[in-house]
Image: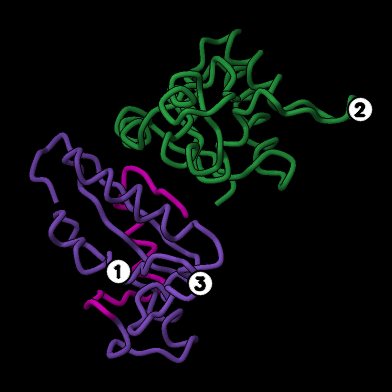
Chain colours: A green, B purple
Amino acid sequence: MKFSLAIYAAPYSSQASATALKFTQTLLADGHEVYRVFFYGDGVHNGSKLTSPPQDEVNLYLDWQVLAEQHSLDLVVCIAAALRRGILDQSEAKRYEKEFDNLGAPFELSGLGQLVDACVNSDRVITFGA
Amino acid sequence: MSNRKTAKKLLFISRKAPYGCATAKECLDALLAASAYEQDLGLLFMGDGVFQLKKEQQPEAGRQKNISATLPVLSMYDIKDIYLQASALAERGLTADDLVIPVKALNNNDIRELMEQQDQLLSF
């Protein structure tokens, strides 16, 4: 079955982001397809490459990155929600004349249309952190 | 609402009060964005989400944009299937007269049926 995930929760503030990661890992292990993971609202913070948890805690950012590389996952971060919260890729940092960017690959900024597209092209869209 | 047979039925479920957290606004942002894609869209207010419909909101003092100003324009975006959970309205001491737009009130059985008709549920 083809799944997409919508994640609205920041990492470490609630269980939702970690649960979404585990759910994605389980889907892939069971042979399902993950069409897209869409990060919206506070969920955009999952894409910050500056995330630096203590070493004895799970590193959600790195785990998403590794999983995405292993399975060519499409990790899309809502651009409108991200810009407000100070999550910028290189080109947005340049556009807004900021000294730094903090969105790590393979997370990508894109519009809410990607969430709609995920709804249209997936059998199931599962929301985390609503 | 789109007449295209390929359109998917997407129901946006908004369960949060209008201010205090960004969820209500971000639900409406997502809904308005979706209106550009010719899908069959619906919006359901449940729980504290019914407060978004209340007349005479004055959020400007809290430096917030007025959510209730967005609701009357939804019909211009072809979003006409707007529902609320009847029990949620009553539990909060509100009636249809308190709302900025007319909304179809559904009991919980109607809501279950509405959800069953959808291709996707988007919960906010």
Magenta residues, start to end: B100-124
Q: Are marks 2 and 1 on the same chain?
A: no
Q: Which residue is mark 1?
A: B83
1 or 3: tag closer to the N-terminus:
3
Q: Is residue B117 magenta?
A: yes
**Element type at mark 1:** strand
How crowded is the residue under tag 1: few (<14 C-alpha within 10 Å), some, or many (20+)?
many
Residue drawn at (41%, 48%), measured in percent from left and top?
Answer: B122
Examine the image and state in which quarter residue B74 appears.
bottom left
Residue A110, image x and y in percent? 39, 28
* B62 or B41, nearer to the observer: B62
A27 w.r.t. B93: above or below: above
A64 w.r.t. B46: above or below: above
Residue drawn at (66%, 13%), measured in percent from left and top?
Answer: A66
Q: Is residue A54 visible?
A: yes
Residue B107, image x and y in percent? 37, 76
Q: Is residue A1 visible?
A: no
Q: Which residue is mark 2?
A: A56
Examine the image and state in which quarter residue B76 appears.
bottom left
Residue A59, image x and y in percent? 77, 25
Please give the count of numbered marks on the rendered protein: 3
How crowded is the residue under tag 2: few (<14 C-alpha within 10 Å), some, or many (20+)?
few
Between the residue at mark 3 and the residue at mark 2, the CA separation in whole angstroms equals 40 Å
**Element type at mark 3:** helix
* A92 or A50, nearer to the observer: A92
- The amino acid at mark 3 is Gly
Q: Which residue is mark 3?
A: B62
Between the residue at mark 2 and the residue at mark 1, the CA separation in whole angstroms equals 47 Å
- Between circles 3 and 2, the one closer to the viewer is 3
